Image (cartoon, rainbow, N blue to C red):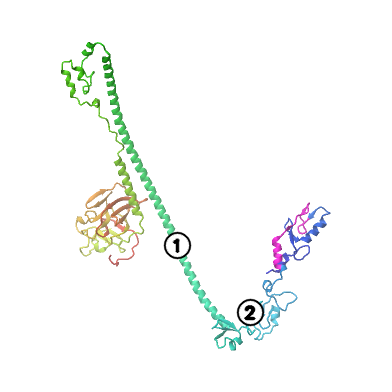
Amino acid sequence: MASAAVRDELLCSICLSTYTDPVMLRCGHNFCRVCIHRVLDTQDEAGVYSCPECREESQERPALMRCLALCNIVENLLITPPTQTEAGIFCTYCVDSPVPAAKSCLLCEASLCEKHLRVHSKSAEHVLCEPSANLEDRKCSVHKKILEYYCTEDAACICVSCSLAGEHRGHRVEMLDEASEKKKERLRNVLQKLITRREETEERVRSLEECKRKAQEKASGEAERVTALCRDIRRRLDDVEKRVLSEISRQEKEESFSLSALMKKLEIQKDELSRKMRHMEELCNMTDPLTVLQEPDTGDLYDPEDTGGHDGGHDGGDGDTGGHDGGDGDTRGHGEPLHDVDGPDVAVISDTFHTLCDIVTDIMRGIYMEDPADILLDVNTAANDIHISDDLKTATGTQENQNRPETAERFQHNQVMSRRGFSSGRHYWDVEISGSVRWRVGMCYPSIDRRGQQSYIGDNNKSWGLRRFNNQYLVRHDSKVIPLPHIISSNRVRICLDYGAGRLSFYALCDPIRHLHTFTASFTEPLHAVLRVNAGLITILGEATTGRNHNRN
């Protein structure tokens, strides 16, 4: 809708009329093409041209640029006669100048400004409504009467004639205001439901955003753990490389030294043989037989171990020289036998790499499991010198007798077993040890003995455990002990079970996580977590899902 202000902007400052073929000077001011040409023509004699608006001067006649945007505005808003809808609803009776209408009368089919509204009839048949250009839309198309009722059966607005004698005769009808309020109420109910659904949707979006954030944090944490793991693997690979290269270098130096000593010895033998060969050549070149025969048969002349081809040369002698045929005929008797050159000890290298592969495999198995198992301690198996916390997560060594009833399930000394057993799948659980230098953690069959030393973790063939005794760490199974070379700086331990693969692994939860040992076995019973604490306490990490009244698995 073009307002008065907009219309003023579309007036040429020369002719004070709406632009006709508007053009623009270099300074940006617009004029009718004909108007500005006339002004410029009058300025030709002076030789100086200036803008009628801003008086910007130029020595040359300025070029005129057609303003396409302004041309389109003029054509659309001014050349085309404005419709009532475009120009707004104006008072029907204000003929001198357009005045916006305040109301429209359906009976008079006229729009009225505030002034004419005050003198308009107030009778009931004169129905006033908001200003409208199409008053016919508010009348019945058949009877040309005002639409006053709403047919609920046909969902249509009707006049009184439609209700009494028309096609809606006998139908249930309501006043327009009443029907409108009912529809508004229904719309409010629907709106409230939509608002509720939108709030629920927003809550779901927030929940999903929180899940996304947690997933990103978890992914970031896993990425950091993987980075630390890879860094640890690279460090171990570097250590293995250094050890293997050092071993190869050591073997190479040892072999080189041995070969150098042998080569020196053979050089001495070669020089001795050369000397003997020269002496023999001198004898062979002598023409005096007497001199040749008088040369003594000593080691300087012949190799005492050489028997090849000398018999015929002594047929005329005293017969004693025939004794030279007792040798083995092997000219290698002049020195050491030929040395077999071995390569590096590949068994040492292979064992080192196999050890590293086992470590990497165990680390991968230990880390890439989903969630920790929910481990709850079974009070019915706890020895009377162990106190069990209310959340069934902590076992504390105590000298105070707990006075629990003696049963076949209960351990005699210092141990407690978990309620839950695992007979398939992959699981892990973590423990934290506090205030104790003597403890054991591990897993066992439910058929483990409960009394005597044979019930201790690792001292039988039904349990596998990690033990700390003072500052020494070791793993035990079936009374067989394997000391651990690692210095464990963490007081947290992870136990990982891959039941199907028959692997039970222990890790120190330091940074990065360190593999301690992996047992391999063909498990035949469910495995339960088991703790042994002499003093201090051992806590199973993770939240308990229940309390002391949890049903036993």
Q: Position of residue 365 (x, y in %)?
A: 34, 54
Q: What residue range appears in magenta?
A: 50-77
Whole-number angstrom distance, CA of label 1 to CA of label 2: 53 Å
Q: Residues within 10 Å of mark 2 (few under 14, many from 20)?
A: few
On the rendered image, what quadrant is the N terminus found in? bottom right
58 magenta-colored: yes
Mark 2: which amino acid?
Asp
Q: Which picture quadrant has residue 29? A: bottom right
Q: Which residue is mark 2?
A: 137
Q: Position of residue 84 (x, y in %)?
A: 68, 74
| 179 relative position to 22: left or right | left
Dot 1 or dot 2, earlier in sequence: 2
Q: Is residue 453 above or below residue 18?
A: above
Front residue of 479 and 380: 479
| 495 relative position to 49: left or right | left
Give the label on residue 210, or none. 1
